[in-house]
Image (cartoon, grey):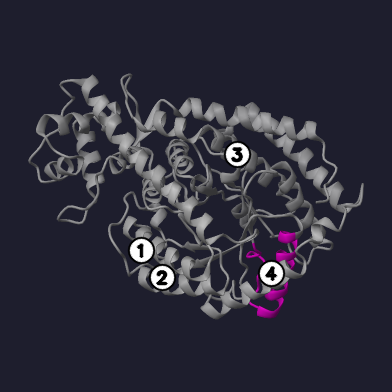
Amino acid sequence: MSQLNLDQGQIDRARESARRIAHRVFDDMSQYTTTTVERATLRLMGVDGVDDNQIPLPNRLVAHLQEQKLLAHGAASVVAGAMAEHALTAQQVAEAVAAGKLVLARPKHDKAARQSAEAIAAKMCEHIAAQRAVRSQQIDKVGEARTPWLYLIVATGNIFEDIVQARAAAEQGADIVAVIRSTGQSLLDYVPYGATTEGFGGTYATQENFRLMRAALDEVGAKIGRYIRLTNYCSGLCMPEIAAMGAMERLDMMLNDSMYGIIFRDINMKRTFIDQFFSRMVNAYAGIIINTGEDNYLTTADAFDAAHTVLASQLINEQFAYISGLKPDQMGLGHAFEINPDLENGFLWEVAHAQLVRQVFPEACLKYMPPTKHMTGNIFRGHIQDALFNVVSTLTGQNIHLLGMMTEAIHTPFIQDRFLAIQNAKYVFGTMRDLHDEVEFKAGGRIESRAQQVLAETVGILADIEKIGLPAAIGRGTFADISRTMEGGKGLDGVIAKSPDYYNPFPDLMLAGAN
């Protein structure tokens, strides 16, 4: 594959700045937990279901722990202590608390409670490891597609209709099926329960919906002889819980970004930074590929002028991912084909940006997004824009390729729109399969010079962020031209300062297992 002449010293300096930026945030946030981290911990310990008012039991149990001033110590040892004292399972403890029959207190024997919590956590880790092994076995048995993998969405609102569409998509050529979440779910501070049929603009992310879709994709994958990956959205106020459910039900990918919720959903900065660490840790242990959201920056900022902010964010996301135990091949770092098509030589700049990202992250499982911002509703022009996007993807060796839809600016795509998108991509990928081995980038040419310029600007902006800190940089609107503050946004009331004896068994077990 032809390579651009890039200064490795600049890449190293940028990566080192990003490392220090991410570790500073992690160190600052390590003194806190959140309500949803504790709810995820309880789910991993076996708590599920809802009470008579359809309130999830993890929420009921965490609220009770807050009322009793116990959450700062960590939910795991308190619940494990109650299990031992009353001879109950974690689920039975939650049900008794919800029914008003049990009031929790500090464990009488804290060391024994911690040992019990660790044993429970170890069993769940064994289950998740087994699911990871099943994925590998299925891929070995039925095979998988060559990259770029074709990524296609379903979004009917009804999980059973989604399954029909997902099967059709797989049979038409999709390699990844993403179930879009219902509008606004990222702002719900709870996870709905059971199979759902009434989502708007998408389908609710629930554990039962994950289980149903996973089973359907396994079935169709066996039929067509290709493993079909399942994706959902591990973002918003319930990042850790959705990560836990995805790990238990063998999802393969999760949309999981360290800053997306802050910038685009106005979720509190502290809440997001704490939650992203725990959720990514679970994803890492489960062998799940995360997809980051830098592509979204280019829907609000100019794709040409702000290209360096995308690369800077990718480098920061990479370092946060390392802290959580993720490997490079689990990092679906996001970018997008979003330059204004009226800009002269815009295609060259798209190639420059995509090739730059490919070379800075040679082992990453890159996620490349199609044009959306400049889709006009002219389906014929849109189909051409998508074809050019497909060319860049195969030319620069992208891994996860989100299919562009010619009806992007009109409505949620119909099955026939998706079929045409798949045919477009498959034609380009087939007819240009080895093009990247046959062409070379002109030394000192426009593409190489543009990539060098973006890299130099990235080094500069990361040095600036390192000086002032990431929260201050976000406050200045560095990313996506959107400003947020440390104390603003939704969910700050769910941030809890840890007591000196805080305990959670999962980080030690999962980080060791991931590494």
* CB atoms of marks 1 and 2 within 8 Å: yes
| In this rendering, the label closer to the viewer, 2 or 3 | 2
Most foreground residue, 2 or 11:
2
Q: Secondary structure at mark 2?
A: helix
Image quarter for residue 60? top left
Q: Label 1 sits on what residue type?
A: Leu
Residue 163's label in the rendered image is 2
Whole-angstrom CA distance, mark 4 to mark 3, is: 28 Å
Label 2: how many residues lie within 10 Å, few (<14), some (14-19) or many (20+)?
A: many
Which residue lies at the image location 80% right of the left edge and 51% below the top edge?
1
- Outermost residue on the front side: it is 141
Span shown in magenta = 370-394
Which residue lies at the image location 85% right of the left edge and 42% below the top edge?
5
Whole-angstrom CA distance, mark 1 to mark 2, is: 8 Å
Q: Position of residue 504 (x, y in %)?
A: 33, 30
Q: Which residue is mark 1?
A: 212
Whole-angstrom CA distance, mark 2 to mark 4, is: 26 Å
Residue 62 seen anywhere in this rendered image of the structure: yes
> Which numbered disc, 2 or 3, marks the residue that appears first in the sequence?
2
Whole-angstrom CA distance, mark 4 to mark 1, is: 32 Å
Q: Position of residue 26 (x, y in %)?
A: 50, 29
Label 1: how many residues lie within 10 Å, few (<14), some (14-19) or many (20+)?
A: some
For residue 63, side relative to residue 459 (left or right): left
Residue 386's label in the rendered image is 4
Q: Secondary structure at mark 3?
A: helix
